[in-house]
Image (cartoon, coloured by chain):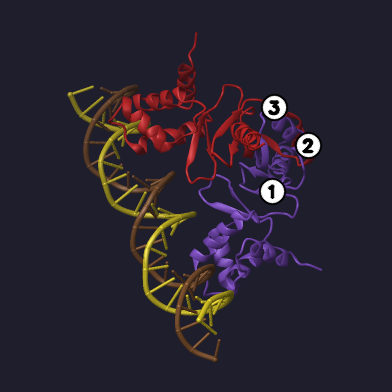
Chain colours: A red, B purple, C yellow, D brown
Amino acid sequence: MESRIDRIKKQLHGASYKLTPQREATVRVLLENEEDHLSAEDVYLLVKEKAPEIGLATVYRTLELLTELKIVDKINFGDGVSRYDLRQEGAAHFHHHLVCIECGAVDEIQEDLLEDVEAVVEKRWNFQIKDHRLTFHGICWRCNEKHAAEDKNKE
Amino acid sequence: MESRIDRIKKQLHGASYKLTPQREATVRVLLENEEDHLSAEDVYLLVKEKAPEIGLATVYRTLELLTELKIVDKINFGDGVSRYDLRQEGAAHFHHHLVCIECGAVDEIQEDLLEDVEAVVEKRWNFQIKDHRLTFHGICWRCNEKHAAEDKNKE
DNA sequence: TATTAGATGATAATGATTATCAATAAATAG
DNA sequence: CTATTTATTGATAATCATTATCATCTAATA
């Protein structure tokens, strides 16, 4: 069976890049921390645990490379740092975020919500969609439940 | 008739802020350059034309204030700068972007594409949506037409 | 083995944004 | 009306994420 890392290796080779030990360590950190929306600094610290000799610049370079090859998505929640998410295989278009404006939590949705919307956009604006970003800002289920419990206590 | 700037003035007063000359100049620049996705630097240079004594820090402060009051949206297209868009009145949820990966153009869509999608998200994930960001990346109509013309020439 | 191109690590440079602080302006108290 | 407090501003220093530089190292090839 072909592992995820093997496939990434092939993608790099296809673009004539090598999977160096540093790049592999970086990819492994991303694989082990999916759904965590790590910043470059986060990745750096985690890689350092396994491979202390790695430099921050190399992590940045690797993340940039992976972004160019569309192996990771570089996303921005407006807090001043870029975050990097491994793409789910074959599911680039099924990955959205719910950002809670109360507690700051970021949840993910893995579901194609936009199929119909994309068809409209492509036709109406003659725009060939290659990718998209959809983020909702609001109040998450945890905060909603907390408020519901508080309201109950008041009665 | 109540002008747009009057309404913004009221919003500021409601939150006990004043519409100082510097703030007014900044808002006017935003009003006169809607759809342009100005960066803080852009706004600063435009304000300076009318009011040369204004400081960059004041522009940043004003934009931050307007963002907090949800008078403008602070958006990020991944090019390292934040951009500021005046909210269309009562249409916060009808404002999306098409970013062209070839020529870099950013077009706007003023249309509620997400009504159905939002209903699904609110119900299925118990998430109270307050706002959203939807951006499509792809190839714009201009580049599409250019390619079509080129293909025609080849024949 | 010598040579070359690619990659790395340390660190300096950059650039956007934020913090600081003295000077002003505006609001309020006396 | 003047004194006093408070908010706001402009200049600029500080911060922080990211990028560029450059000498060194590695791996592939001649």
- Residue A98 seen anywhere in this rendered image of the structure: yes
Instruction: Look at the numbered discs 3 and 2 and tell me whether their residues touch, using CB distance below 8 Å.
Output: no
The front one of B40 and A24 is B40
Q: At which x and y percent is residue A51?
A: 31, 26
Q: In percent of the image, x 53 and y 47: which residue is there?
A: B79
Q: Which residue is the site of mark 3?
A: B124
Residues at marks 3 and 1, CA–CA distance in whole angstroms: 31 Å
- Label 3 or label 1, whichever lies nearer to me, is 3
The front one of A87 and A38 is A38
Q: Mark 1 lies on which chain?
A: B
At numbered mark 2, what does the secondary structure look like: helix, strand or loop? helix
Q: Which residue is the site of mark 2?
A: A123
Residues at marks 2 and 1, CA–CA distance in whole angstroms: 15 Å
Judge the density around disc 1: few (<14), some (14-19), many (≥20) Cα neighbours within 10 Å. Answer: some
The front one of B127 and A58 is B127
> In the displayed structure, does residue B112 sit left or right of residue B52?
right
Q: Residue at the front extreme? A: A155
Q: Which residue is the site of mark 1?
A: B107
Residues at marks 3 and 2, CA–CA distance in whole angstroms: 29 Å
Residue type, numbered disc 1? Asp
